[in-house]
Image (spheres, grey):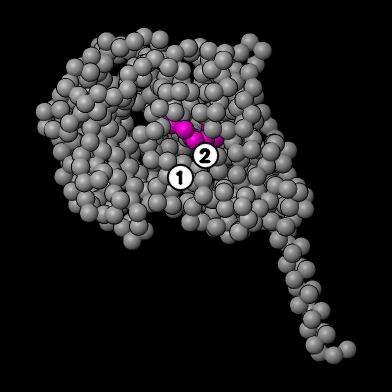
């Protein structure tokens, strides 16, 4: 036999062995029609649907699109086996901004969006929603029943990441976080075993999943409380950005957040925005009862304004309307968050001015868009991992987000946004208003999210991980997300 023939056989043999141990090929063989590769239409469509350019830039070896829980279970068993062990990511809506949050380079990304069913229980008190569904589509299916659920406020927000990381909703001041309203979960564990988790069957994991994100398994179904909902009030008003309107907002919002003025149906956001070389100011006001022009917002609507939206409509239509004001995607994006007790108006004014001064340092960044959102905290019932005071009505949350065009500006934008937030936090801390809690769904990976929830809750997360994921699949093979501190 000639050397060339021997060499050809050896090369062929290596190629065959490589194919045999390729997890993507093995997965395709096991579950045909669910795996896509770079350069294909399905693969490219999945990547292009991520919100941020950071996530779109990652190229997994393949993308797996399961259609049911059994396929997810088969996937987990395969990628944790000795022959095919590989890292993976799990995505739903794909709205988290930072690199690797729900995508991966070279491994396998599980795109859950085909597991998107919405079913009602016989008494219509529970909606069973697939782990890959998006909230706005769920709303549309519930409107004919005059029902809604605790979901996202803009189109395209995935059920999985939103509910497992907390979830801020229109009903946040009446019913807390979205995760506070989940009755049960269907979960594929790191072993590939499928279990149903509720308060009675697995109380430790049930609580850990309420904020614990992707640390314990792949959630393929959420059983959530439905809420009777016909029309709700939605108003979006714009204002001239002046010191006078800022001072009026500082007083109006500080008063709105005082416990004596609490109205559980009233949720809102004050939006300070820098874009296109100018500062903008607007209020979004949502009232979950079928009440036109609720009096609780009078202090805001009486401020001289430029007009806008004001109407009663369904949850589904409100989400569509509000979503028109939010960029549908970003080339580059960075986001930070923090929380505090409601201060007096002078402190709000100082927060506004710190933001205004800081933004001037990145005013020349290509396509810069900076949003400073001030909104009430959900009034939690304590059924989660966050360590917040149940029933407290006067806590406030900041969401600071920057969008821009070029990767070359990453360092500058991140430095400036961090500087703004650090100065705002220092101001609040020096006056006794700052609280430790960091909200996972608005945070950057640089923020110590789980640590902010307190040592006792970290211990609960760690114990649940060791019990339900003893091999650490979701700590070691899923690099994205906020891992449980050792």
- Quarter location, residue 73: top right
- Quarter location, residue 274: top left
**Which circle's residue, 1 or 2, is located before the other in the chain?**
1
Q: Given contact means CB atoms under 8 Å apart, are the residues at marks 1 and 2 in contact?
A: yes
- In terms of secondary structure, what is the magenta stretch mainly? loop
Toward the viewer: 368 or 171? 368
Q: Is residue 326 within the magenta segment?
A: no
Residue on which the image places disc 1: 51
Residue 20 is situated, as x and y percent measured from the top left of the image, at 76, 62
Q: Find numbered disc 2 in the image and state the secondary structure of the residue it sits on.
A: loop
Q: Is residue 292 above or below residue 166?
A: above
Report crowding for label 1: few under 14, some 14 to 19, many 20 or more residues within 10 A (C-alpha): many
Q: Is residue 145 left or right of residue 448?
A: right
Q: CA distance from mark 1 to mark 2?
A: 8 Å
Q: Residue at x 48, y 26 (%)?
A: 151
Q: Find numbered disc 1 in the image and state the secondary structure of the residue it sits on.
A: loop
Residue on which the image places disc 2: 93
Q: Is residue 252 above or below residue 74?
A: above
What residue range appears in magenta?
153-160
Q: Quadrant of the N terminus?
A: bottom right
Residue 165 is situated, as x and y percent measured from the top left of the image, at 47, 35
| Residue occupying the far bottom of the picture | 2
Q: Is residue 119 left or right of residue 240?
A: right
Q: Is residue 156 within the magenta segment?
A: yes
Residue 99 is situated, as x and y percent measured from the top left of the image, at 45, 52
Residue 46 is situated, as x and y percent measured from the top left of the image, at 57, 48
Q: Residue at x 20, y 28 (%)?
A: 239
Total labels drawn: 2
Q: Residue at x 73, y 48 (%)?
A: 33
Q: Residue at x 79, y 81 (%)?
A: 8
């Amino acid at each position: 036999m000639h050397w060339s023939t021997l060499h050809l056989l050896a090369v062929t043999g290596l190629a065959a062995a490589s194919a045999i141990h390729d997890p993507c090929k093995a997965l395709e063989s096991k579950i045909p029609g669910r795996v896509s590769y770079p350069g294909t239409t399905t693969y490219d469509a999945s990547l292009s649907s991520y919100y941020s350019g950071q996530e779109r830039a990652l190229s997994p070896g393949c993308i797996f699109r399961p259609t049911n829980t059994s396929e997810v279970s088969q996937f987990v068993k395969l990628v944790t086996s000795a022959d095919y062990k590989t890292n993976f990511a799990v995505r739903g809506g794909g709205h988290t901004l930072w690199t690797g949050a729900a995508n991966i380079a070279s491994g396998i990304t599980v795109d859950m969006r085909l597991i998107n069913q919405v079913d009602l229980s016989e008494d219509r008190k529970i909606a069973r929603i697939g782990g890959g569904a998006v909230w706005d589509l769920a709303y549309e299916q519930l409107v004919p029943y005059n029902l809604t659920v605790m979901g996202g406020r803009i189109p395209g927000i995935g059920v999985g990441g939103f509910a497992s990381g907390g979830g801020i909703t229109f009903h946040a001041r009446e019913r807390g976080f979205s995760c506070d309203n989940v009755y049960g979960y269907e979960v594929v564990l790191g072993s590939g075993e499928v279990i149903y988790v509720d308060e009675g069957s697995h109380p430790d994991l049930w609580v850990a999943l309420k904020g614990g994100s992707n640390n314990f398994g792949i959630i393929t179904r959420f059983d959530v409380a439905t809420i009777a909902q016909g029309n709700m009030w939605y108003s979006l008003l714009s204002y001239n950005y002046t010191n006078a309107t800022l001072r009026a907002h500082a007083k109006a919002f500080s008063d709105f957040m005082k416990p004596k003025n609490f109205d559980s149906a009233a949720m809102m956001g004050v939006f300070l925005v820098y874009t296109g070389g100018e500062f903008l100011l607007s209020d979004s006001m949502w009232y979950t009862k079928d009440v036109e022009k609720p009096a609780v917002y009078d202090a805001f609507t009486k401020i001289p304004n430029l007009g806008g939206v004001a109407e009663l409509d369904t949850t589904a239509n409100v989400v569509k309307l509000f979503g028109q004001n939010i960029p549908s995607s970003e080339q580059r994006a960075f986001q930070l968050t923090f929380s505090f007790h409601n201060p007096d108006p002078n402190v709000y004014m100082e927060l506004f001015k710190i933001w205004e001064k800081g933004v001037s340092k990145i005013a020349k960044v290509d396509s810069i868009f900076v949003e400073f959102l001030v909104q009430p905290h959900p009034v939690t019932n304590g059924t989660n991992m966050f360590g917040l005071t149940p029933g407290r009505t006067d806590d406030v949350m900041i969401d600071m987000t920057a969008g821009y065009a070029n990767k070359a500006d990453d360092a500058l934008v991140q430095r400036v946004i961090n500087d703004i937030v650090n100065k705002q936090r220092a101001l609040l801390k020096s006056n006794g208003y700052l609280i430790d809690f960091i909200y996972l769904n608005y945070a950057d990976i640089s923020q110590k999210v789980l640590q902010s929830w307190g040592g006792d809750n970290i211990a609960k997360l760690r114990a649940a991980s060791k019990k339900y994921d003893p091999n650490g699949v979701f700590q070691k093979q899923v690099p994205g997300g906020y891992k449980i501190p050792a």
